[in-house]
Amino acid sequence: MTRLNDSVGIVTTQYVDFDVELQLESGRLLGPLTLAYETYGTLSASADNAILVCHAWTGDAHAAGRYDPEDRKPGWWDGMIGPGKVLDTDRYFVICSNVIGSCQGSTGPASLNPRTGKPYNLSFPVLMVRDMVRAQKLLIDHLGIETLLAVIGGSMGAMQSLEWGIHYPERVRSVIPIAGTGRTSPMAIALNALARQAIYNDPSWRKGNYRPEHPPVDGFALARAVGHISFLSDASMQLKFGRRFSARDGMFDFFGQFEIERYLEYNGGNFVGRFDTNAFLYLAKALDLYDVAWNFDSREDALRNLRCPSLWFAFSSDWLYTPAQTEEVVAALRTLGQPVSYHLIESDYGHDSFLVEPEKFTHYIVEFLDRLR
């Protein structure tokens, strides 16, 4: 790793193979497994400074740095990870792994099924977030880390961090769920249902058996646009687009578009080239199935296992995983007498607030981590 200024510098994605069969919540077995991951900083001699960063729905292991000095963009959380930053790589050893079920290096539906020599496609088993965490534990064991100082993540990453604290309490000293929920709401499931139907109705999808070079472009782009709307807010769309009509279209042209329409069209089309359609569907299913109380008698029964300190954040304009959903979990933890802190952050950027305005909440994370050392 070559450092550039306050960046972690030039990084390389690493891959590790596990010759195991992971038992999933569905009862099915998945294996062997490949996990893609990146690390930043140096693991201490006592291996007590490791922080696991968990990515959101369509994220990946590339959280910080660049693969090449000419790369236009760094990793997706580069502003958070690096020397002197919130997750200070002069102090912490930061790990980010791509979840199973994805298409960014870890085993997913586009991977070859070793039993057939062909891509899994829809023969890939349905996953839950808990299964992703089980696979991550294999990586943490492989790296020789007995205890994680913290597990942190936003959105689907928040779900993973909570699962870590509940299912591996002896391996985690703290969790930091950001813009998360204890269970996915009917509205969030409904939005994902629309995204699914957009893909299913594209004839190129072929029930998941599309050729990689000919994905269901139209349906997938529309599905991504539906999802992207849920990441924004009315206020953020007013700020960025308002009711401006596209300068290249005539207002009375039947196919003329507002700027917000052009943005969604561009964002959806651009996404198709960098993500696999089936992986998108499998991860959406995992989000829909998420319920911290799964296989427990109740939510409180599950949360009773979260014995380490937890630091929660919600955002005022987030209508995908609303502050009320976060506050339900926080209230339950307080009732149980568990060590919990919570901050409601005022932001106009909807669910994406944790990526757009990190400066509004990151000082709380620095203070929280300082108390753990």
Image: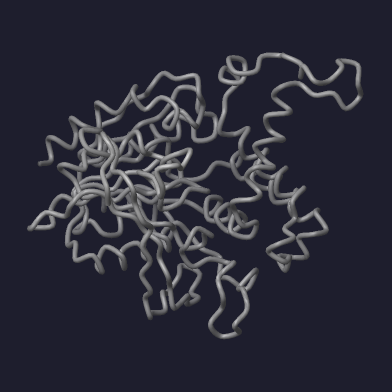
- Residue most toward the front? 70
Left or right of 192, for residue 248: right
Residue 196's spot in the image, x, y percent?
69, 51
Q: Which of the pair 16/323 is nearer the observer?
A: 16
- Position of 266 relative to 302 (above/below): above
In this orientation, which residue lies closer to the viewer: 56 or 261?
A: 261
Residue 160 seen anywhere in this rendered image of the structure:
yes
Residue 354, by quadrant, is top left
| In the image, residue 265 above or below residue 150 | above
Quadrant for the C terminus in the image: top left
Q: Which residue is drawn at 18% across and 45% down?
A: 92
Q: Which colour scheme is used?
A: one colour
**At which x and y percent is residue 285?**
58, 55
* Left-right relation of 370 to 150: left
In the rendered image, which quarter is residue 174 located in?
Answer: top left
Asked if 371 appears above or below 29 in the picture, the reply is above
The structure residue drawn at horizontal position 52% and vertical position 59%, both measured from the top left corner, is 102
Front residue of this view, candidates 171 and 367: 367
Residue 113: percent from the left, percent from the top? Answer: 56, 78
Question: How many tags in the picture?
Answer: 0
The image shows residue 318 at horizontal and vertical percentages of 50, 28
Residue at x 23%, y 65% (from the top left corner): 143
216 lies left or right of 109: right
- Residue beneath the point at 43% across and 57% down: 98
Q: Can residue 165 be seen in this view?
A: no
